[in-house]
Amino acid sequence: KPANMNGDGIGNQKPKAVDVAEAVQKARDTFNRGVTRPIEWRRQQLKNLLRMYEENKSAMIEALRKDLRRSKMEAVLLEVDYLINDIKSLLHHLDEWSKPEKPEKGFVNMLDEVVIYNDPYGVVLVIGAWNYPLQLLLLPVSGAIAAGNTVIMKPSELSVACANFVAEMVPKYLDNDAFIVVEGGPKETTELLQQKFDYIFFTGGTSIGKIIYEAATKNLTPVTLELGGKSPVYIDNTGDIMITAKRVLWGKFINSGQTCIAPDYILCTKEVQDKFVEAAKKILREWYGSDAQKSADFCRIINNRHFSRLQAIVDASKDKIAIGGSYDANDKFIEPTVLTNVTASDKIMQDEIFGPLLPIVTIENAYEAIKFINEREKPLVLYVFSKNSKVVSSFVDNTSSGGMCINDTMMHMGVETLPFGGVGASGMGSYHGKKTFDTFTHKKSCLIKNFSPIGEKLASGRYPPYTDANLNM
Ligand code: NAD
């Protein structure tokens, strides 16, 4: 039985050097031996992974605290419990999702079997991001296991403590020949991408996503790209502004804005902007007190490079700050900040913000907001706050985004039956719930005939010499 980890020493270990080519070959040999095919074997591995989570909850919380100064509540809600519930659902549905499907068949196949087998792809590469370092890596990994693949997993090198946790724990709980952790950054990932995989699942920024996609084309490897971008929020004047502000600010400031589906910027009229700012002042004081730096519930920026990037945006936006605006480099702290009367040409509107800065761009109406959105890359998610169903429909019908969430933020991600993913620059493919299982499954179509003389006679018209008698003309 694997030893528990109490959290001490996590985040201090140097990555273990792994021979990448050897690791991939080992995973391939294991797959080719058929080890991962039996459903019972997969079930056991999923149970082991569940045990890994349940026996190491405090180590996971501690690793997240070290990497992001994540509060216990956010660590449990967004990663630990999220992973546990996901595995439980996979275990519950494993038989149902993996069994062969029997689609409808036409008259000509009345005597045949028509089957779709749920076939594993083979060796899967899963590359994780640092902002939700456990969930974004291990959620796809568990789907790949359930679907019968072997997996090479590469945690982000920036969330050091979580990468160490994964590298230390996975070999203790999962089959070492089938599931292998490769630690490292761009150099190791580049080495990995020189290998042949049967599926690549990547979570990260759009620019690296393009590198992954290009590498995958060499072997015609299918990919899922879970990318980022600027997710807009449209707010009209029909909803409850206090509830709206709470839901927007929560989605923005959770994990200090380092969330792929964080509301990136708000589009609203000047009138709504004023009301939003008033509400936001009250709410932020209630949540984080008069000094957010002292709040135990507010995360830190992952590293100095990202801190400097955000600091430069704050410095360039000084005249537009309505709330917040302070920072402390020694603590990698940036105050929850709201900026008003921002324009499309401002620095903050050029790239995904990925930090606790919320700009408001004023527009005249929904039509102008839709135009603004459609002039830019397709977002991962579009948020609309309105009680007017016609307004909501006009956004649904006239914009393209990975997903939409109406009158809330982030919560669509927790709906297991809603596939989660981007479109265009925000990604391709999706996962969550059954879609995760299907993502790592090749739908292998199969027609099964028999040797019945009746069937043979009925279909004998296909053989030469041909006569027009069998044609419906
Ligand atoms: P990133 O693209 O910098 O890194 C992601 C992974 O790519 C890491 O494992 C990293 O080691 C690897 N990598 C970095 N440089 C590489 C290179 N040159 N060649 C090959 N691999 C390389 O992303 P990040 O900073 O970890 O995460 C932030 C981004 O991810 C944001 O854009 C965010 O929106 C996006 N994101 C998307 C989702 C989603 O589900 N769609 C979730 C979280 C984050």
Image (cartoon, rainbow, N blue to C red):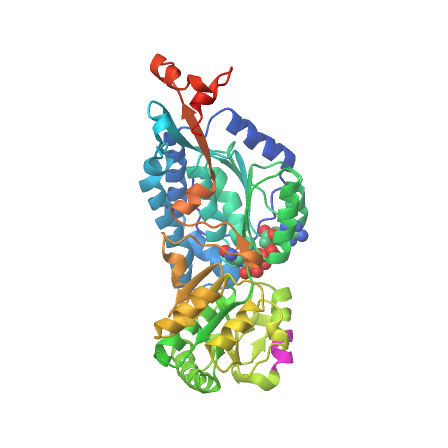
- Rendered location of residue 58, percent (x, y): 41, 54
Ligand 1's quadrant: bottom right
- Rendered location of residue 7, percent (x, y): 46, 52
Quadrant position of the N terminus in the picture: top left
* Residue 313 counted in the magenta span: yes
Query: Looking at the magenta stretch, what is its main secondary structure?
Result: helix
- Residues 442 and 255: in front is 442
206 versus 310 height, above or below: above
21 versus 417 height, above or below: above
128 versus 115 height, above or below: below
- Residues 188 and 291: in front is 188
Quadrant position of the C terminus in the picture: top left
**Residue 174: which quarter of the image?**
top left
- Residues 216 and 466: in front is 466
- Rendered location of residue 294, percent (x, y): 47, 75
The mark total stands at 0
Q: Is residue 351 left or right of residue 407?
A: right
Start-end of magenta stretch = 312-317
Q: Residue at x 51, y 62 (%)?
A: 68
**Residue 295: which quarter of the image?**
bottom left
Q: Can residue 280 be seen in this view?
A: yes
Q: Can residue 261 be seen in this view?
A: no
- Rendered location of residue 282, percent (x, y): 40, 83
- Residues 449 and 352: in front is 449
Q: In this view, does 79 lie to the left or right of 29?
A: left
* Residue 19 counted in the magenta span: no
Q: In this view, does 189 lie to the left or right of 181?
A: right
Q: Residue at x 36, y 17 (%)?
A: 455
